[in-house]
């Protein structure tokens, strides 16, 4: 029986043309594909003309139950491809627990390189790239949010966060009031048709987004000391 394994497969963060050849080959040869959202992945597979695949859901609400099934399938010889809705599995998306389970069960796994909103935003921001820190989504509570942003201004290099468009104005208001000189960037809709990078201080960005309400997926960056 061929050796089973788990393949962590990055998918495009917006532009479907960014998928790699290795990623397509992995999806083609997979016996089953573990998806954050099977509907979303079905659209990607249709775009790639890949059909007949068994899709199973793998998200934060069912990881504990689903992962043993995937590990058992890999141990029986299946090739399991794991994908999130966009970007690298495991980075603010399902995948970390699956990797831990592979290590514990001694199941071979491979991580394919590919699109990443974090690195795309970092390079495009124009902020320092010699060192960087990624903290996922900013906290909902304003006190914790401000504390993290204050730490970002004191850190070496650039700190990146994901942020909701519905909360961006609140975040910019908080930063403008407390750290008005901090250099920031709002990277929006990366790789998509309406991609934008807005660079400046929090008061400058706040003025822009008050006049132009933000939409889409956002990476928020703050330059350190």
Image (cartoon, rainbow, N blue to C red):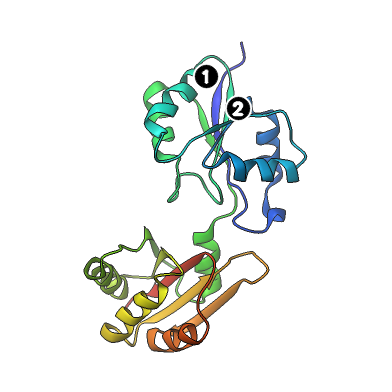
Q: Which mark is residue 32?
A: 2
Closer to us: 187 or 129 = 187
- Mark 1 surroundings: few (<14), some (14-19) or many (≥20) residues within 10 A: some
The C terminus - image quarter: bottom left
Q: Which residue is mark 1?
A: 73
116 vs 130, left or right, is right
> Whole-Å distance between the Cαs marked 1 and 2?
9 Å
Tell me, yes or no, whether the two marked residues, 1 and 2, touch with CB atoms within 8 Å.
yes
**Residue lying farthest to the right in this orientation:** 49
Percent position of residue 84, x then y: 53, 44
Percent position of residue 162, x then y: 43, 63
State whether residue 159 is above or below residue 101: below
Secondary structure, mark 2, is strand
Count the marks: how many? 2
The answer to whether residue 175 of the structure is visible from this angle is yes
Q: Of the residues under marks 1 and 2, which one precedes in the sequence?
A: 2
- Mark 2 surroundings: few (<14), some (14-19) or many (≥20) residues within 10 A: many
Residue drawn at the location 63% of the way across and 58% of the way down: 14
């Amino acid at each position: 029986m061929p050796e089973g394994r788990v393949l962590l497969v990055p998918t495009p963060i917006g532009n479907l043309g960014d998928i790699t050849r290795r990623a397509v080959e992995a999806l083609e040869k997979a016996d089953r594909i573990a998806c954050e959202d099977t509907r979303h992945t079905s659209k990607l597979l249709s775009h790639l003309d890949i059909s007949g695949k068994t899709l199973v859901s793998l998200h934060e609400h069912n990881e504990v139950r689903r992962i043993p099934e995937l590990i058992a399938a890999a141990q029986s010889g299946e090739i399991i491809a794991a994908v999130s809705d966009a970007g690298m599995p495991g980075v603010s998306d399902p995948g970390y627990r699956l990797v831990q389970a592979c290590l514990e069960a001694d199941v071979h796994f491979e991580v394919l390189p590919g699109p990443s909103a974090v690195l795309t935003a970092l390079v495009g921001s124009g902020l320092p790239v010699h060192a960087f820190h990624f903290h996922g989504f900013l906290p909902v509570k304003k006190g914790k949010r401000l504390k993290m942003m204050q730490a970002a201004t004191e850190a070496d290099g650039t700190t990146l966060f994901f942020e909701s468009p519905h909360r961006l104005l609140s975040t910019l208001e908080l930063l403008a009031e407390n750290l008005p000189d901090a250099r920031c960037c709002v990277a929006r809709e990366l790789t998509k048709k309406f991609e934008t990078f807005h660079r400046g201080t929090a008061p400058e960005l706040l003025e822009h987004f008050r006049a132009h309400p933000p939409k889409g997926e956002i990476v928020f960056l703050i330059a350190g000391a």
